[in-house]
Amino acid sequence: MSRVLVVGGGVSGLAAAHRLRTLLGPDAELLVVEAARALGGKLAALEIGGRRVDVGAEAFLARRPEAGERIAELGLDDQLVHPGPAASGLRVGGRTVGLPPRTVMGVPGDPDVAAEALSPAGLAALRADRPGDWEPGGDVAVGALVRARLGDEVADRLVDPLLGGVYAGHADGLGLRATVPALAAALDADPRSLLAAARACLPAPPAEAAPPVATGAPSSTPGRAPVFGTLRGGLADLPATLALAARADLRLGRTVTALARTPHGWRAEIADAAPVEADAVVLAVPAPAVRRLLADHAPDAARAAGEIELASSALVVLALPAAAAAPLAGRSGVLVGAGERRPDGLPWTIKATTFSSEKWPHLAPGDPADPDATAVLRLSIGRHGDPASLAALRRDDDDLVSAARSDLAALTGIEEVPVESAVVRWPGGLPQYGVGHLDRVAAIEDGVAALPGLAVAGAALHGVGVPACLATADAAARRVAEHLAATTAP
């Protein structure tokens, strides 16, 4: 009987444990050790305004197959829902405009779609599409590339808000190769035009007469497959379901402090608990913990993990009287462009808002005339390396709610006192995929490959979204299963 230790009880660790159960069978002993006192990591939810709302990741990219396939495997496919038809917005140039359609992380293939978001000078710079140097297979900061070829406004007003929403970082600090790999590959094939490279990445537009996609829930664009998905009870249901299906021994509030090789596998030292012996180990923890645990076994891999920086963020969740949220009708949220100012000249504290009750039909308040009906909003705060954001994150919860409400009033005119409010903080919650990130990941994976019975998974590697995390979890579980099969073969 094999024993596998999974270090980390976020979605990556629990997905690895679940896949190990399916690969190793019912007799394998699986142990998940998690430093926090709750499972799920960045997938979490709370009750507010009479409904359960995600307060970490709220959706997954439906165009990647991993999340949808795992949800079906777990028997949750009847809980799968997609956004409604409400449109996203951008706060740029002192006004709120529609988010341009058909862009690659904000880089348009057609300049006309961005006309509303740019000044005449900014649109002219976009149309100019200046050529620039490009080294096939190389990497550059997204912001530097876009500024050089399409102008500052495209970087600040279109690209930066989208990257900030995904990574809580800045376009100038994130590498193209890891954050927008399709665009990097298109430039490898033909570096002459960034607009042409973006066009090459975009799917063909749907035929106008195409029937709606039969998904069981509304799509944001009729006739096209939905871009995002979530679970009706919250995406936070996924880790709990994975844990149940894995049938693992769960130990919460315990930190693995060190790993040591043994003749038959590994020994994990655990703070304030007895050490654990295992035949194999999966590390599904943030980059700093990977660095610490690999330092004695794979110094180059540990060094590479230590170079991955982390961004902190916070989420203010408000439940408003449904009638007060009427100005939000038809808008799923607003991203705030870099360097934007409020009408009073002050900087924005928030970087984005999600009008959850507009975005997700299953969170709609029902009858807005009902005096007890509420609408739920999420307001995001935090950009990596931004002094103003760091200062905002140091505020106490009441002050942060006040600042977020002030921004909401400036953005939408809504000044109503919320029925309920909550603040959820994610210190070091998102890895930053800087220039050369894939080289760092390769160093981590190469170092681990030389250590039998050890595997890594998680958001620090090949993507911060749920599908990417599930993919790394599956890869780690298969590596471990192959190792165990080889060591126990007659």
Image (spheres, grey):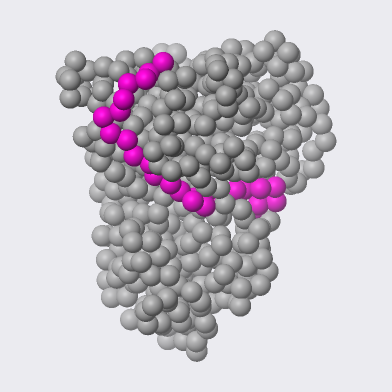
Look at the image and tell me in which quarter the C terminus lies: bottom left
Tell which residue pokes out farthest to the top in this image: 120
* Relative height, residue 19 to residue 173 (above, below): below
Q: Is residue 419 left or right of residue 254?
A: left
Residue 214 visible here: no
Name the residue at 45% across, 79% down. Answer: 269
Q: How many marks?
A: 0
Q: Is residue 29 left or right of residue 177?
A: left
Q: Quadrant of residue 359?
A: top left
Read off the magenta span.
413-438
Q: Is residue 384 left or right of residue 211?
A: right
* Relative height, residue 265 to residue 332 (above, below): below
Residue 30 visible here: yes
Look at the image and tell me in which quarter the N terminus lies: bottom left
Name the residue at 45% across, 72% down. Answer: 256
**Does the segment drawn in magenta span residue 136?**
no
Q: Quadrant of residue 53?
A: top left
Name the residue at 63% across, 27% down. Answer: 339
Frontmost residue, 49 versus 74: 49
* Relative height, residue 487 to residue 243 (above, below): below
Query: Where residue 121 sits in the image (x, y, percent)?
Result: 73, 13
Frontmost residue, 64 versus 97: 97
Query: Where residue 335 sits in the image (x, y, percent)?
Result: 51, 27
Name the residue at 50% across, 87% down. Answer: 262
Query: Where residue 137 sits in the image (x, y, percent)?
Result: 74, 46
Query: Where residue 408 sits in the image (x, y, percent)?
Result: 43, 24
